[in-house]
C-alpha cells in the first residue's frame, strides 16, 4: 500500500526539440562549487560528463554565501554554476540552503539555538544548530526559500527541490522554551482535555498529576526516569515538529513552482530513529534517502534492509538515493575504505530495491573542513585514480540499466513489519532489558531471510498485509486496538504471523495490556507468560528445535500453553525454564500464529526455514546459491528485472535462470550467470503472473 502523496518524479530538462528525455537512472552527487576556485568548475563539468553524471544537488550548505548579511544577497555564483551545468546537460536538484543558519543570524538571534535535555545550548560551529519550533528561525529560513524559488522558478536546469538537508540529524530533540510551548500545543491537539492527558500519561504515579497545561514540560533532566508516556509523546511530537517545518518549506515551493517536485533526504539507516519516515513520506513528491554502510558482520545486510524499507516507505515506487559514499566516510571511529566491488554492489543493491537515482556525498572530496577525509567521486588523488575509474565504470553500468528506470518493486510473499512507535517505546528506560535493540531484531530476521534465499518486504506497520503469506512482527511492542485487529484478521484469513518476545505488551499510551504477556497477542497465540525472564550479559540458553539446536540470548520466558491446539516447535533445553516451550505455533484455519520467546540472532535461519515450509513459501533461487546470493525483483507491465547480488567474497555461479543479461556475464549462451566476488548481475525476464 502506498504511503506517499501522488508520485512525481524528477522534472528532467527538455531536449533541444522540446521533448523530455527517455527514462533513465539518475547519477551524480552533492556538488559544492563554492568550496573551489572558479577555474575548477570547468574541470568538474568535464569530468562529470565523462563519468555519465546527469544530476547534482547544489547549495545544500550555502546560506552564508547566498545571504552574507541580513540585508544582502549574492546569487551571482549560483546563477553561473546553474547555467554551466545546464549548458552541459546536467540537471540540478536545488537545495533550499536552510540546513545551517549563518553566523550573522545566530549572533543576532541566539534564541534560535537548540537546548539539550540538561539545559546546555548547542552553539554554532558545526551544522544544523537551529530549533525546529523557533518562529524566528522559520521567519528567516522561509524568506530564503521564497527568494530562491522566485529567482530559479524558470531556470531550465531545475529538476527538483531539495528541502533543507537530513532534517533532524543533529537537532531532532530540542528542550528549549520554544519546544515546551509547541509541545503543549501538540498535546492539546492530541488530548481533548487535561484529564485525558493525565489518564494517558498515568500521572497518578509519582504524584505527577497536572492541573494546568502550562505545567507540562519536555522530558528534561530529572531526578529519576521521566514519565515513559511523556517520553514517548515527546518523540512523536519531535518527529511531527520537523515534519511541520518540512511542510512549511514545501508549501512555498509548491506555490511558486508547482511543476517542480519537492523532496527531502531521509536517513533510513542504522540507529537513526527520531523521524517517523513512514509518516513523513506522504508530505513529499518522491522519497529520497541517505545511507552509509555501518561496519560489522551484517554490514551489507543492513544496507539491503535499509534500501528495502525505504522502497516500501515509498510505496514500492521509484525513490532517490541522495547520498552514499564511494569509499570511506569521516565520522566512524575507524573509517575503512571500501573493498573492490563494494562501490558497485552497494549502489546496485539500492537500485534493486527501487532507487532510480544513485548519488553520492560528494562530487569532489573537500580539502578543508570536517568532512575532508570523506571520500568523493573525485578523490584527493584526482581523476587518475582507482576510485575515480570505478566511478566512471559505475556510470556506464547505470546507463546500461536504463530499461529498469520507472519500474516498481515486485511484492514478495513475505514481509517484516517495522513500526516507529514500537522502536521508540521498546527502548525506553526502566524496562526489563536495556540492551534490547528493536532494529537489530528486525535486521536479524532480515538476515535469516537472505540466508534462506527468500525475498521479503520490509514494510511500515500500517501496510495492507492481504497479499502476504508470512509476516514477521519483531518486537511489535506497541499494539493499539486497530493494529491488533488487523493482525488477527490476517491470521484468520489464512496468513501466517510470527511474533517475537516483548511484543503486544502496551497500547498506544504505553499502558500494559493486562492479563499476562504477550498481552494483545495472548489469545491469538494461545499462550500466557506471567513474568519476563531477561538474560544477563554473557548468559544464554540452548533451544532444542528437534535438529541441531540453537542458542538464545538477551531474553527468555516461562511460557504456559493455554490452547490445546498449540504446537511446540522448540523447547528450552537449558536454563531455569528447561523443558518448557520456547517457540510455539497455533494453527488457525489455514493460517497460524507463531511465537519466538528469545533472541536467536544467527540461529534464526533454521527456525525461519521451518516457518517458510509451513507457510508454503519456497525460494526462487536455485538451491546451491541460497544464502550466497540475494534476489530482488523490479517489474513493469511486461518485464521483470532480477537483481542477483553476491553476498560473498568469492565467485558464485547461478544456474537454472533464464533471461537477457543486462549487466554481468553468463558462461556461454545458456550457461550459469557468473557473479564475481561482491558482484551483481541483472536479468530481464518476461513478466509472469501479472
Image: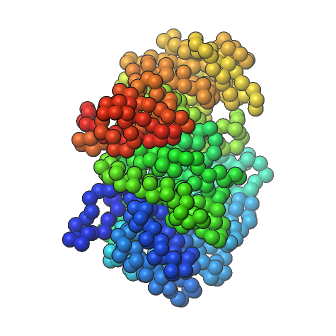
The residue that appears at 65% across and 58% down in the rendered structure is 330
333 left or right of 631? right
The residue that appears at 46% across and 45% down in the rendered structure is 349
Q: Nearer the viewer, residue 519 or 87?
A: 87
Residue 338 in sight: yes
x then y, percent, for residue 146: 43, 77
x then y, percent, for residue 574: 71, 16
The residue that appears at 63% across and 70% down in the rendered structure is 367
Q: Which residue appears farthest toward the left when viewing the image?
A: 17
Residue 450 in sight: no
252 to 293, vertically: above or below:
below
245 to 685, vertically: above or below:
below
Give the colouring mode of the picture: rainbow
264 to 520, vertically: above or below:
below
Q: Nearer the viewer, residue 392 or 344?
A: 392
* Count of labels in the image: 0
Query: Which quadrant of the figure has residue 56?
Result: bottom left
454 left or right of 607? left
The residue that appears at 57% across and 57% down in the rendered structure is 238
Q: Nearer the viewer, residue 318 or 384?
A: 384
Quadrant the C terminus occupies: top left
Q: Which residue appears farthest toward the bottom when viewing the image?
A: 71
x then y, percent, for residue 352: 41, 44
Query: Which quadrant of the figure has residue 371?
Result: bottom right
x then y, percent, for residue 323: 51, 58
Query: Which quadrant of the figure has residue 47?
Result: bottom left
Quadrant the N terminus occupies: top left
Amino acid at each position: 500500500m502506498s504511503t506517499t502523496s501522488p508520485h512525481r518524479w524528477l522534472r528532467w530538462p527538455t531536449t533541444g526539440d522540446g521533448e523530455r528525455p527517455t527514462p533513465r537512472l539518475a547519477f551524480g552527487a552533492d556538488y559544492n562549487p563554492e568550496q573551489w576556485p572558479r577555474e575548477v568548475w570547468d574541470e568538474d563539468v568535464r569530468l562529470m560528463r565523462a563519468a555519465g553524471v546527469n544530476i547534482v544537488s547544489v547549495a545544500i550548505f550555502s546560506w552564508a554565501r547566498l545571504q552574507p548579511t541580513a540585508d544582502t544577497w549574492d546569487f551571482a555564483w549560483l546563477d553561473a554554476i546553474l547555467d554551466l551545468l545546464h549548458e552541459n546537460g546536467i540537471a540540478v536538484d536545488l537545495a533550499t540552503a536552510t540546513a545551517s543558519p549563518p553566523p550573522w543570524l545566530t549572533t543576532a538571534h541566539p534564541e534560535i539555538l537548540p537546548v539539550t535535555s540538561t539545559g546546555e545550548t548547542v552553539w554554532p560551529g558545526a551544522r544544523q544548530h537551529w530549533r525546529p519550533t523557533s518562529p524566528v528561525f522559520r521567519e528567516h529560513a522561509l524568506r530564503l526559500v521564497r527568494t530562491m524559488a522566485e529567482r530559479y522558478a524558470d531556470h531550465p536546469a531545475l529538476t527538483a527541490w531539495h528541502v533543507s538537508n537530513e532534517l533532524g540529524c543533529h537537532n531532532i530533540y530540542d528542550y528549549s522554551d520554544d519546544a515546551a510551548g509547541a509541545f503543549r500545543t501538540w498535546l492539546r491537539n492530541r488530548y481533548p482535555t487535561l484529564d485525558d492527558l493525565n489518564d494517558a500519561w498515568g500521572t497518578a504515579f509519582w504524584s505527577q498529576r497536572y492541573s494546568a497545561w502550562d505545567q507540562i514540560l519536555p522530558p528534561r533532566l530529572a531526578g529519576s526516569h521521566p514519565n515513559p508516556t511523556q517520553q514517548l509523546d515527546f518523540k512523536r511530537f519531535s518527529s511531527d515538529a520537523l515534519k511541520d517545518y518540512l511542510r512549511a518549506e514545501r508549501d512555498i515551493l509548491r506555490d511558486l513552482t508547482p511543476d517542480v517536485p519537492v523532496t527531502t533526504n531521509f536517513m533510513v539507516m542504522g540507529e537513526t530513529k527520531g523521524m517517523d519516515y513512514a509518516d513523513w513520506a506522504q508530505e513529499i513528491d518522491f522519497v529520497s534517502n541517505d545511507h552509509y554502510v555501518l561496519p560489522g558482520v551484517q554490514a551489507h545486510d543492513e544496507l539491503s534492509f535499509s534500501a528495502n524499507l525505504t522502497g516500501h516507505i515509498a510505496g514500492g515506487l521509484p525513490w532517490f538515493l541522495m547520498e552514499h559514499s564511494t569509499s570511506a566516510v569521516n565520522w566512524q571511529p575507524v573509517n575503512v575504505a571500501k573493498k573492490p566491488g563494494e562501490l558497485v554492489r552497494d549502489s546496485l543493491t539500492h537500485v534493486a530495491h527501487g532507487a532510480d537515482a544513485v548519488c553520492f556525498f560528494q562530487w569532489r572530496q573537500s580539502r578543508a573542513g570536517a568532512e575532508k577525509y570523506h571520500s568523493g567521486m573525485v578523490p584527493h588523488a584526482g581523476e587518475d585514480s582507482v576510485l575515480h575509474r570505478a566511478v566512471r565504470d559505475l556510470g556506464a553500468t547505470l546507463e546500461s540499466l536504463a530499461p529498469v528506470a520507472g519500474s516498481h518493486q515486485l511484492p514478495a510473499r513475505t514481509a517484516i513489519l517495522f513500526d516507529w512507535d514500537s522502536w521508540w517505546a521498546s527502548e525506553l528506560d526502566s524496562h526489563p532489558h536495556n540492551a534490547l535493540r528493536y532494529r537489530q531484531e528486525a535486521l536479524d530476521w532480515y538476515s535469516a531471510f537472505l540466508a534462506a534465499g527468500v525475498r521479503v518486504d520490509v514494510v511500515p506497520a500500517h501496510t495492507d498485509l492481504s497479499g502476504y503469506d508470512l509476516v514477521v512482527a519483531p518486537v511489535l511492542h506497541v499494539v493499539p486496538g486497530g493494529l491488533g485487529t488487523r493482525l488477527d484478521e490476517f491470521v484468520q484469513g489464512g496468513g501466517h504471523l510470527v511474533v517475537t518476545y516483548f511484543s503486544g505488551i502496551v497500547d498506544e499510551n504505553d499502558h500494559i495490556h493486562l492479563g499476562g504477556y504477550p498481552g494483545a497477542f495472548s489469545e491469538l497465540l494461545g499462550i500466557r507468560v506471567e513474568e519476563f525472564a531477561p538474560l544477563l550479559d554473557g548468559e544464554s540458553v540452548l533451544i532444542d528445535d528437534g535438529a541441531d539446536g540453537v542458542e538464545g540470548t538477551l531474553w527468555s520466558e516461562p511460557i504456559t500453553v493455554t490452547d490445546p491446539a498449540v504446537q511446540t516447535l522448540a523447547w528450552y533445553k537449558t536454563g531455569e525454564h528447561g523443558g518448557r516451550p520456547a517457540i510455539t505455533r497455533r494453527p488457525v484455519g489455514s493460517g497460524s500464529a507463531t511465537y519466538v520467546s528469545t533472541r536467536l540472532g544467527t540461529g534464526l535461519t533454521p527456525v525461519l526455514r521451518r516457518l517458510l515450509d509451513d507457510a508454503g513459501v519456497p525460494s526462487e533461487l536455485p538451491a546451491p546459491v541460497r544464502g550466497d546470493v540475494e534476489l530482488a525483483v523490479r517489474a513493469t507491465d511486461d518485464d521483470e528485472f532480477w537483481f542477483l547480488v553476491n553476498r560473498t567474497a568469492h565467485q558464485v555461479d547461478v544456474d537454472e535462470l533464464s533471461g537477457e543479461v543486462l549487466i554481468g556475464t553468463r558462461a556461454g549462451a545458456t550457461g550459469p550467470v557468473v557473479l564475481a566476488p561482491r558482484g551483481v548481475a541483472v536479468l530481464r525476464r518476461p513478466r509472469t503472473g501479472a
